[in-house]
Amino acid sequence: MKPNTSDEHIHNALDGTSAPPPDSEAVTILRQYQEILTALERHRAAAPPGLRARILSQLEPHPQQPRWLPSLHQWWISALSGAAAMLLVAIGWWHWNTRTPLVNVHFELHAPGARQVELVGSFNHWQPGSIRLTGPDASGHWTATVALPEGRHEYLFLVDGQQWVTDPSATVVRPDGFGHVNAIREVTREGTML
Amino acid sequence: MLVEQCLAGRLEAFDELVGRHQDAVYNLLLKLSGDHTEAADLTQEAFVRAYRKLDGYDPRFSFKNWVITIGVNLAKNRFRHFARRRRIEMEAASPTPSSPSPPDPRLEALEAALGLLPEKLRLPLLLRHVEGCSYAEIAQMLGIGVSAAKMRVMRARDELVQEMNHETKHV
C-alpha cells in the first residue's frame, strides 16, 4: 500500500500530538510507519570493545598525585620537584601580574520588568548563579562590573532564570550553534574594545 | 557534575562520560555512515575533540547531544566518501568485513533504505527516532528552524517507508 505522503495526521499521530486517524486505511498506513520506525529504534549497535580505551589513550594523562611521604632514597627527587614547582608558581604569578592583568568590564541591560538578571559566559564556564546584575534602577537598567582577564569573552544575559538575552549593545555577536546568539566582548589592557 | 570534574583535571570523570554515551554516539554515526570502522573512528575523534574544547561546552545543553553534534560535523566533512562507499557496497551486493550484514533480511532492507535517504533527511530522522531528540533539539543541533526540522523528519519518514515498500517488492 502506498502511503499518503501529505497526510499530516499520520505524522502527528507518530509524534503523539494527535489521536490516530479514524479511517481504517489510514490506520493501516500508520501501523506500517510505526513498524518501520520501531525497527529503526530497536536495531541498535553497541560501540566495539576497546573503543573506550582507545579514546582514553588519546587524551592527556591524568596528573600524578603528589607524594607527601617519599621514601628515603627518593627525598632528593621530591626536593627538586618541590623547588621546580615553586619556581613555576613564581613564574606564573609574575606572568599573571605583568602580562594578563584583570580589567574591570561594565555590563548593562535594560530590563525594567525583570526580577533577576544574571551574566553567564565563557569566563564562568556558562554556569548561572555566579554573577548577578544589580537593579533595576529608576530607569529599569541592570548593571554589573566584572574583573576579566584580557582576551575574547562570549556571554549572554539570563533573565529571571529562563530567558537568554543577547546584549543589545554588543557590536560583535556569534551564533552558538544551539539557537542563541552570543555577544562578544574583547578585553584589552586599556579596557574593552568592542 | 562530571564535566566540571574533567575541567578540574580528573580524567576518570571523562572516562565515565565516554562510558555513558559512547554507545549512543557510535550507534548514530554508524547509521549515518553505514560503516563500522568509519563510525568507530568518528566516535573516537568526536570524544577527543570534545575533551580538548571542554571549557567551551555550554552546560545548558545535553553533553551527549554536544558530542553527537561534533561527530555529525566531522561526518559531514566525509560524506562524499560515505556516499561513494555506500554505492560501491550496494552495487557489489556482498558484505564487507567491516560491515557484516544483519541476519534479518528486513533489517537489511531497512539499512539499505536508510542509506538511500539524502543526508539532509537521514540525519534529522536518526536524531528523532534513534536518539529521541525533540524537534527543538534537532533544530539546535543542525542550526535550522523547528518547523524545518519537523518537515525534514516527516519527509524522511515518507521516503523511508516508500523505499522499504520498494525494497520489499524486490526481495
Image (tube, rainbow, N blue to C red):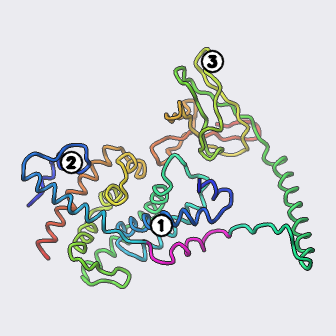
Question: Residue at horizontal 37%, vertical 52%?
Answer: B133
> Which chain letter goes with mark 3?
A
> Which chain letter goes with mark 1?
B
Marks 3 and 1 belong to one chain:
no
Q: Which residues are magenta?
A: A47-61
Q: Nearer the viewer, mark 2 or mark 3?
A: 2
Q: CA distance from mark 1 to mark 2?
A: 31 Å
The amino acid type found where label 3 is placed reads Asp
The amino acid type found where label 2 is placed reads Ala
The amino acid type found where label 1 is placed reads Gln
Q: Which residue is mark 3?
A: A137
Q: CA distance from mark 3 to mark 1?
A: 49 Å
Residue A2 position in % (x across, y down): 10, 59
Question: Residue at horizontal 56%, vertical 33%?
Answer: A167
Q: CA distance from mark 2 to mark 3?
A: 50 Å
SS for callout 2: helix
In primary-sequence order, the first of circles 2 and 3 is: 2
Marks 2 and 3 belong to one chain:
yes
Residue B91 position in % (x across, y down): 24, 80
Question: Residue farthest to the top?
Answer: A138
Other residues around mark 1 within 10 Å, as few (<14) / some (14–19) / many (≥20): many
Other residues around mark 2 within 10 Å, as few (<14) / some (14–19) / many (≥20): some
Residue A92 position in % (x across, y down): 83, 55
Residue A153 position in % (x across, y down): 64, 43
Question: Residue at horizontal 21%, vertical 48%?
Answer: A13
Q: Which residue is mark 1?
A: B22
> Which chain letter goes with mark 2?
A
Q: Which residue is mark 2?
A: A13
Picture quarter with the C terminus of chain B:
bottom left
